[in-house]
Image (cartoon, grey):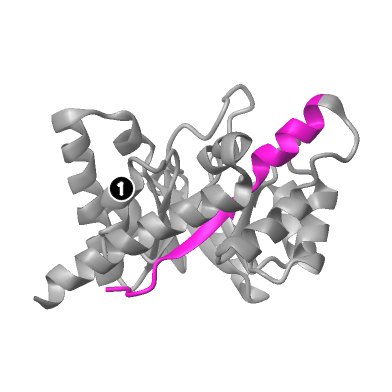
């Protein structure tokens, strides 16, 4: 059970807007600093093979110039491994990647790819980088993540966010069960993908989850009310939900 629920802010789509026109504005580094001032606990950035948003230079600047921990999302490829070993972020989160996808479509199938992932994870951990695996909320994926020596599993919340009614409740049960399984196995449990003001509360109430990573929604809301405002509101909703859950546990 985790009292404090951390918030990692993904700044990828600040870079998406910058890259649409070229030049240096808006600057993802500035967004990271705003996020820090607004209550974020970490910064997430996904360095994709095609560099559609975050660039190599962005990663280097984020590591050197921002005090918050950097969570580098990346596919398990040799190119990305070389970058991670050179940059040494606080954490690497391994994710699946398809060039044609608009966004990450699901969790990394660690059960299928365990043979390739094991040495990859080992090389990251050798130099002190914490390793997270972005997985669907399934027991087999979490069991294999433990066997591979991962430190963290990040549960994919996309299906929960997209579902409605009874289907959403079923996805929420999967998340709860997966979070308990992760903690039972000694893994740190994070969650993220698609979370919004409307959907974050129920996930924040899962006390086994210690961190939520949220990006696209916050950057979208920033258009209407500013990035700092959107982060502060998300932070408040998370804290309220977690406090309520802890209150019920102690009652």
Magenta range: 1-20
* Residue 6 is a magenta residue: yes
Residue at 13% x, 31% y is: 166
- Image point (80%, 51%), residue name: 58
User: Measuring 18% from the left and 47% from the top, which residue is drawn there?
Assistant: 173
Q: Quadrant of residue 66?
A: bottom right
Looking at the rendering, in which quadrant would you find the C terminus? bottom left
Q: Residue 85, percent across and down? A: 74, 64
Q: Is residue 227 above or below residue 208?
A: above
The picture places residue 167, in percent across and down from the top left corner, at: 18, 31
| Residue 248 visible (yes or no) | yes
User: Which residue occupies the foreground of this view, 83 or 212?
Assistant: 212
Q: Quadrant of the N terminus?
A: bottom left
Look at 59% across and 61% down and name the residue there: 38
Q: Nearer the viewer, residue 227 or 144?
A: 227
Q: Which residue is mark 1?
A: 137
Residue 209 in the image: state x and y as whole percent.
34, 63
Is any part of residue 52 visible from this angle?
Answer: no
């Amino acid at each position: 059970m985790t009292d404090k629920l951390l918030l990692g802010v993904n700044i990828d789509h600040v870079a998406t807007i910058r890259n649409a026109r070229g030049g240096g504005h808006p600057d993802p580094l500035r967004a990271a600093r705003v996020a820090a001032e607004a209550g974020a606990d970490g910064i997430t950035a996904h360095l994709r093979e095609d560099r559609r948003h975050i660039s190599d230079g962005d990663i280097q600047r984020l590591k050197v110039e921002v005090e918050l921990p950097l969570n580098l999302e990346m596919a398990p490829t040799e190119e990305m491994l070389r970058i991670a070993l050179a940059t040494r972020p606080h954490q690497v989160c391994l994710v699946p990647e398809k060039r044609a996808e608009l966004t990450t479509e699901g969790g990394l199938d660690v059960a299928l790819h365990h043979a390739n992932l094991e040495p990859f994870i080992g090389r990251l951990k050798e130099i002190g980088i914490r390793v997270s695996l972005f997985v669907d909320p399934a027991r087999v994926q979490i069991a294999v993540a433990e066997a591979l020596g991962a430190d963290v599993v990040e549960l994919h919340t996309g299906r929960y966010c997209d579902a409605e009614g009874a289907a959403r409740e079923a996805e929420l049960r999967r998340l709860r069960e997966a979070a308990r399984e992760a903690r039972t196995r000694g893994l740190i449990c994070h969650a993220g993908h698609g979370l919004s003001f409307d959907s974050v509360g129920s996930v924040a109430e899962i006390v086994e989850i210690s961190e939520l990573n949220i990006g696209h929604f916050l950057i979208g809301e920033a258009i209407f009310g500013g990035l700092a405002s959107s982060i502060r509101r998300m932070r408040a909703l998370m804290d309220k939900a977690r406090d309520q859950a802890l209150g019920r546990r102690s009652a």
